[in-house]
Amino acid sequence: MALSISYFAWVRERMGVAEEVVDLPVDITDLTALLAWLAARDARGASAFAEPERIRAAIDGVMAGAGAPLGEAREIALFPPVTGG
């Protein structure tokens, strides 16, 4: 399954790219598995996703929690928690 992944803020800095299109293995079916797979690919992913509980995600523009199914998702956005003032 081809999936567009966008990275924001320090996640983008650690990954070294703002966006990429990946072909997911068939066993990557939820957000938790996606983050583990990204972390295992290389040192950049290991750095960006060392603490997956800190990562926020949107699947096709809808906020999603850990373990959310990817289903037929076309785009995932990954970013750190956002604070406001």
Image: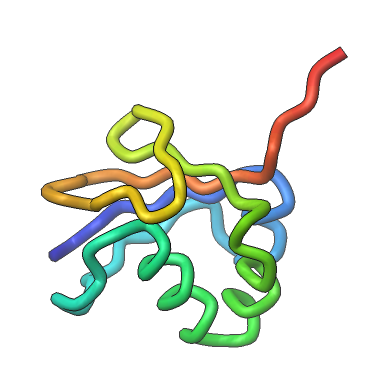
Residue 82 screen position, x and y as percent: 71, 31
Horizontal side, residue 78 vs residue 12: left or right: left
The residue depicted at 25 percent of the width and 57 percent of the height is 3
Horizontal side, residue 59 vs residue 14: left or right: left
Residue 15 screen position, x and y as percent: 61, 66
Residue 52 screen position, x and y as percent: 60, 62
Q: Residue furthest right?
A: 85
The residue depicted at 14 percent of the width and 76 percent of the height is 26
The residue depicted at 21 percent of the width and 45 percent of the height is 74
State the count of labels.
0
Quadrant containing the C terminus in the rendered view? top right
Reply above or below: 43 against 73.
below
Viewer-proximal residue among 33 and 19? 33
The residue depicted at 56 percent of the width and 60 percent of the height is 17
Viewer-proximal residue among 14 and 79? 79
Rendered image quadrant of residue 11: bottom right
Viewer-proximal residue among 80 and 12? 80
Rendered image quadrant of residue 60: top left
Residue 33 screen position, x and y as percent: 37, 70
**Colour pattern of the rendering:** rainbow
Horizontal side, residue 36 vs residue 44: left or right: left
